Image (cartoon, grey):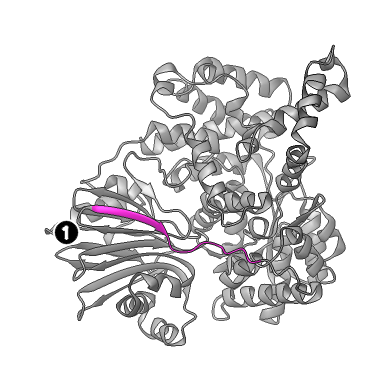
Amino acid sequence: MTTRRVLCGWINLDERVASQDALAAMLAAEGLAPAQIRVQTSEAGVLACTHPAGSSAVDLRSGSMAVLLGNPRWPDARLAMLAHSEGHAAALLDAWRNSGEAALETIQGSFALVLVDSARDRILLAVDRCGAERLCFAAVGDTLVFSTSARAVARHPLVAATIDRQALYEYLYCHMVPSPDTAFAGVEKLLPAQCASFSGGRLERRFYWQLPYAPEVDADEASLRKRFLDLTEQAVARQYDEKRSTGAFLSGGTDSSTVSGMLGKVSGQPARTYSIGFRAEGFDEIEYARITSRHFGTEAHEYYVTADDIVEAMPLIAAAYDEPFGNASAAPTYFCAKMARETGIEIVLAGDGGDEFFGGNERYAKQGVFERYHRTPAALRKLLEPLVMNFPLGDSILPVRKAQSYIRQARIPLPDRLETYNFLHRDPLQEIFEPEFLSAVDTERPLKLARDAYFRSASTEVIERMMHLDHKITLADNDLRKVTRMCEAAGVEVRFPFLDDDLVEFSGRLTPRHKVDKGRLRVLFKDALRGFLPNETITKSKHGFGLPFGVWLNSHGPLKSLADNALDSLSQRGIVRPAYLDALRKAHASGHASYYGVMIWILIELELWLQHNA
């Protein structure tokens, strides 16, 4: 048994392509050996997965086989019994035999799956609705290569993919590589609630589910609050495993505090909670975690992350991810998960998802201020804009300068406006990137991907479109990857109660004002939790596992040495101009260390990842 969670393989329904060397190459990309996995082999190819995270099955009657990784739930009682007795892959094959592709509608929870139907000459790939699991693939002629790791797909001899410069640009823009792209040329990944069907050398992608928005405008507020509490308790109960030691991350925010409190309630004993602190002014919020811990009587565990820890963590993060990943809070997440594992925890519950489905991100309120500008009559805007923008000496008069900034930002449509302060918009791209690199990339693609997710929402409401975008970009592409991979590296399994299917669908039955109203965030969410959570938790501003990397970089010798060596090496790769790196370091040293530290972290992790993977 291994704590690693990997699914991989390849299929060609027209000719024999099975090869132990190819399997070994894919597994080696993720530091695994064939002895650590379970394999289903046929003349068509190979399905492999680690155990116990994954299961595989063969249906001899239909000539079908499947592999499924994750923690799925089967609302159908018969399929649930089959999954319990024979494994999730067996339940999947049964659902496929009876329902075909509609079988995807019968699965809830987290999963990545591959199903091969030789009789129908068809291969099906899919991931869960929220994107808790991931699945990457590459089609090479009539062969489909797939894995939960883009790096493993790239290492298959038929694929032999190189690192994609376009993906490196997208990483520097988004701080991760957004789906459907990956770090490797020709390798793609599925989006949340997406499936891909491969037949006759052709691959077709589609979304098998979309969050329906059917707000219950006449619903009683008290009943909505009660339903939210009941569904949240049910979601935590579904993720709690009384046979395995279970704890919860606790930052002191509303999400983690809710999960921690509910864990104690459903388990009937004090929850074991894990919190991170920093000995740096303005970054340490562990007192909020202590408030929650005292309120619920949790068994609290704390760890203070140090600059020495960050020196250890940065290379570990670069090696752990199959693509460059720049979310700096991966480091405290790792140490928090490591602390949990060292105290005997096998499963940790995390609060991710509350923001994206119930309206918790501060930008939702901020963008609402800008959207009001578009509700101003066009004739009035036409009159005001020249007066404000051409006001004499406007730059030197604070109220006028603020009005000009407001108009400039409001003119930019969503979702592009969300990237107004992106680092790559601060300076001309020609001053950031080497000419050859810049000429090889589509600098508009990150925004194109954001627009696609924003406008694909089933809602026309601005707030819900932003939340739909965040479901894809912030949650599935970023935060879930951060927490899942760092927990895996620490040796624990993580589960996300706020991604419970019933709870997510309930969010679609709320009105936009239940989510954000007049600058208030998570309106119904917080109203429902009054009396359950401490008042200080309800009213605190959002923070999370913020990291004082930029501050430490100025004073910690080993960390500065790591940074200097990485940036010097990166300057020789023909990606980022050395002059830009020098200017960034000077700006960091001269002030605003936390601000410029963000981009320095992003660049260091890129270089460390390239050293590990190039």
Taking the magenta stretch, the answer to whether it contains residue 610 is no
| Closer-to-camera residue (394/167) | 394
* Residue highlighted by disc 1: 18
- Residue at 53% across / 58% down in the picture? 487
**Image quadrant in which you'd find residue 407:** top right
Residue drawn at x 78%, y 41% as measured from the top left: 369
Local secondary structure at mark 1: loop
| Residue 610, visible in the rendered structure | yes
Residue numbers of the magenta segment: 202-214
Name the spot of residue 273 as percent of width and height, x first. 69, 65
Bin the neighbour count of mark 1 within 10 Å (Cα to Cα): few under 14, some 14-19, many 20 and up.
Answer: some
Number of on-image labels: 1
Query: Along the horizontal axis of the image, is 548 left or right of 489?
Result: right
Image: 198 above or below 347: above
Task: Tell me: 448 left or right of 289.
Answer: left
Q: Residue furthest left?
A: 15
